[in-house]
Amino acid sequence: VGIAADGRRVRHVNAVAAPRVLDAPAAAGGYPIHLGSGILDGLGSVWAERARGGAVLLVHDAALSELAGRAAASLTGAGMRVVMAPVSSGEASKSLTEVERLCRLAASSGMRRADSLVGLGGGMIGDLAGFVAASYQRGIDLVHVPTTLLAMVDSSIGGKTGVNLVEGKNYVGAIWQPRLVYMDVDVLGSLPQRELASGFAEVIKYAFLEGGELLDLVESWPELPGPTEPLIDLVARCVDHKLRVVAVDERESGLRASLNLGHTAGHGIEAATDYQRYAHGEAISLGLLVALALSADHAGLDPENRERAARVIRRHGLPEELHPDVDLDRVMDALGRDKKSDGASLNMVLISAPGEVILGADPPRDEVRRAIEELRP
Ligand SMILES: NC(=O)c1ccc[n+]([C@@H]2O[C@H](COP(=O)([O-])OP(=O)(O)OC[C@H]3O[C@@H](n4cnc5c(N)ncnc54)[C@H](O)[C@@H]3O)[C@@H](O)[C@H]2O)c1
Ligand SMILES: [Zn+2]
């Protein structure tokens, strides 16, 4: 996957540099990813060129009404009819109740099979909007406009969509690829520091999965979000990594599982704390440290790598210590129940060196427990 510098211009009022366009390979969905600074107002002209129908349901985080207003103005300016669909912020909105409400809003607004849905927001909106797009009239075109770092580097790529049940997170869903992903890094300017850091935990994950230049870049990253051009480059590298993995394996039977580095213990810690104490990326930071410690013990990884990760984690205010209140028995319980484990094996991802991934590892439970215990202050 390369970055196509195809010189394409976006028509809109404020002259900005032409965005970078990455192309998701056909096996990963085959759609363009526009990435740039100050490009949000160009969304309409880009989407109008690809859209088949003239109406758009603009599903957006209600906290982002200003960004949504700009997106709507841009789409309207390109001749499209926009139906606004604000959704309350927060994970609770990723529900079947919201899916029904949005599908009915689409129906009552006369949205047809050729029309499209634009999801503007973080991963919560992307997953919800994506699932509505996959379901409404058996599927309509989807555009992701991610507004968090996590959504840019992770959730808007790969096609996973879905909502939560009381019984489990992401328990109902579909694989539904977007037809366009449109990222303006300027919107990250309003994202709270804790959310930026949480998204950066996934960036640290990619850095150890890929090694090389990406790891160097991440190790030397200044305060978040960081300078614009390097930030665009950083997001592009993470997107490119995920696209290459998804192209090989859309449904997580093989290589896609590598993206779960840090997520086995991380999910356990999230579940054991009822998803309350830690933001996702905070739990993943702890999970990464566990995975790197186990990699040193079982996969021949130079133990210095755990320290490298800890330094980056510390610098961005992510946790490197497990809070004393976290119940280790509950963490271990949750590990066994994880969707990714098959009950018998933990199916962990380890690395033998940065960029050298080992899938389906099953270290002894007492050693996993000890590696988590070592996170205690
Ligand atoms: N589909 C996938 O492959 C995938 C991968 C990882 C995570 N996810 C899902 O993503 C969700 C988490 O995503 P998230 O971390 O982006 O959370 P989120 O969408 O809940 O956004 C986090 C917070 O930031 C606010 N926000 C968003 N953009 C903003 C901006 N530009 N300025 C100011 N505030 C802004 C939101 O209102 C919210 O309060 C979870 O539901 C998770 O399951 C999906
Ligand atoms: Zn994650």
Image (spheres, rainbow, N blue to C red):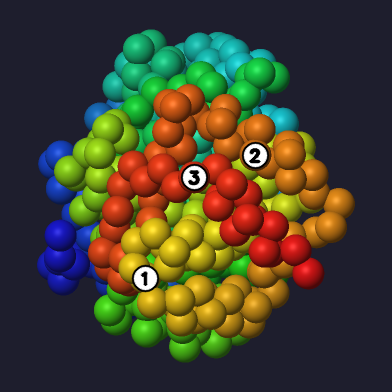
**Among numbered discs 1 and 3, the one appearing first in the sequence:** 1
* Residue 174, visible in the rendered structure: yes
Q: Are marks 2 and 3 in contact (CB under 8 Å)?
A: no
Amino acid bearing label 1: Leu
Q: Is residue 85 left or right of residue 241?
A: right
Q: Is disc 3 placed on a helix, strand or loop?
A: loop
- 322 or 365: which is nearer to us? 365
Q: Position of residue 249 (x, y in %)?
A: 22, 39
Amino acid bearing label 3: Pro
Residue of label 3 = 364
Ligand 2 under 8 Å from disc 2 Cβ: no
Residue of label 1 = 301
Q: Is disc 1 placed on a helix, strand or loop?
A: loop
- 268 or 146: which is nearer to us? 268
Q: Position of residue 18 (x, y in %)?
A: 28, 72
Q: Is disc 2 placed on a helix, strand or loop?
A: helix
Q: Position of residue 262 (x, y in %)?
A: 50, 54
- Quadrant holding the C terminus: bottom right
| Front label number (2 vs 3) | 3
Figure quadrant of residue 210: bottom left
